[in-house]
Amino acid sequence: MSNTREVISSGNELAALAAVDAGCRFFGGYPITPSSEIMHTISDLLPKRGGVAIQMEDEIAGICSAIGASMSGVRALTATSGPGISLKAENLGLAQMAEVPLVVINVMRGGPSTGLPTRVSQGDVSQAKNPSHGDYKSITLCAGNITECYTETVRAFNLADRFMQPVIVLMDETIGHMHAKAAIPTQEEVEAGIVTRKTFDGPAEEYKPYGVAQDEPAVLNPMFQGYRYHFTGLHHDEMGFPTEEIETCRKLIDRLFRKVDEHVDELESNEEYMLEDADILLIGYGSASLAIKEAIHRLREEGIKAGLFRPITMWPSPEKRMYELGQKFDKVLSVELNQGQYLEEIQRAMGRKDIEKLTKTNGRPFSPQDIIDKVKEL
């Protein structure tokens, strides 16, 4: 029996299907271009699987309802675009501090502010690293084709429950609205790979949800199931109660970093495309990588050997691999639908300032010719 199924769909619709197949049973959100089809689709799918989808009064209420659902033990999703992430920022910080698992899909459009609602952009990459104030480690994935709108959404739910925190899935308007054939895993395969969040089953008096090792996430049993503890956005002790005790506060923030930093091997995911014999390295992600791949084929027909490195896990960044590639390639070109938000991370990881860039911020996608012309300049 094949472990894949072929569908013709859009990226937004596949993200909604992925969420439901991955066990999501609650959606709370608010319509916003270009992500609205996720809410439309999941509103049809969830009731058939015993779930609930609610259009809330605004983006803030959307994420609040999803956090509440997750506290009860249910896998929960909210979806939006850049302005919605801005509104959700405070409660993303709450979910980071209280360690509430949650998946947030951001279908990027032009900005700042209301920007270009119906046009493509990759302008929320920096925002995804630090969507709320304070110290924590963001986990952010980025779909590069419509199949990955499905697979990365599934992975996001598993990572959210493994690391007990919000996981952001970046898509963009082009990927979200693109219709094509996709080969996606079967529902049975997805269900077989589901990662369930840890729970405590000992005596209630011994339960300390935040009393875990410094490289591990909190163990939060579902609310209303016999174990009492405290949820707060304040610095807290092992039971979740607010505290200003110096060492407790230091260890809490240290753990929010270490639970991610010390397990990056579980997070990293990248694509290397025709790099083996390449002379020029192109780095891109999301829908821009589709134009890059076509440009690479055309360049090779002219005898110019280019290859692509595509981060799928954007944050934490694949800094070790980017450093290695920076030592191998003299010519490196970063291609982004923004002013160079990931370029800064590439420069930091490679330890170089001579990285070339190709950017676009007018709401239009790259054509392969845009990239070919820039490569030839090199």
Image: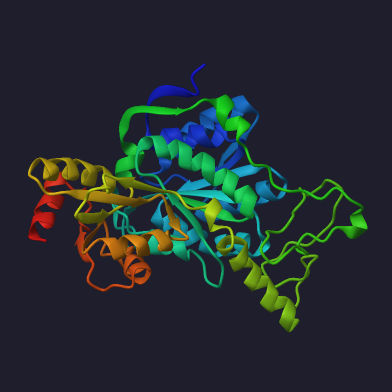
Compared to 236, does 16 lie above or below?
A: above
Which quadrant of the figure has residue 23? top right
Give 155 or 130, whichever is nearer the viewer: 155
The C terminus: image quadrant: bottom left
Q: Where residue 27 sits in the image (x, y, percent)?
A: 57, 41
Q: Where residue 338 sits in the image (x, y, percent)?
A: 27, 60
Q: Where residue 268 sits in the image (x, y, percent)?
A: 48, 53
**Residue occupying the point 23% across, 48% down:** 277
Compared to 264, does 49 lie above or below?
A: above
**Figure coloring:** rainbow
Horizontal side, residue 31 vs residue 255: left or right: left
Does residue 77 appear anywhere in the picture? no
Horizontal side, residue 205 vs residue 29: left or right: right
**Residue occupying the point 60% across, 35% down:** 193
**Residue occupying the point 41% across, 51% down:** 81
Give 275 or 353, whichever is nearer the viewer: 275
Give 124 or 279, whichever is nearer the viewer: 279
Does residue 366 appear anywhere in the picture? yes
In the picture as drawn, the residue positioned furthest to the top comes out as: 1
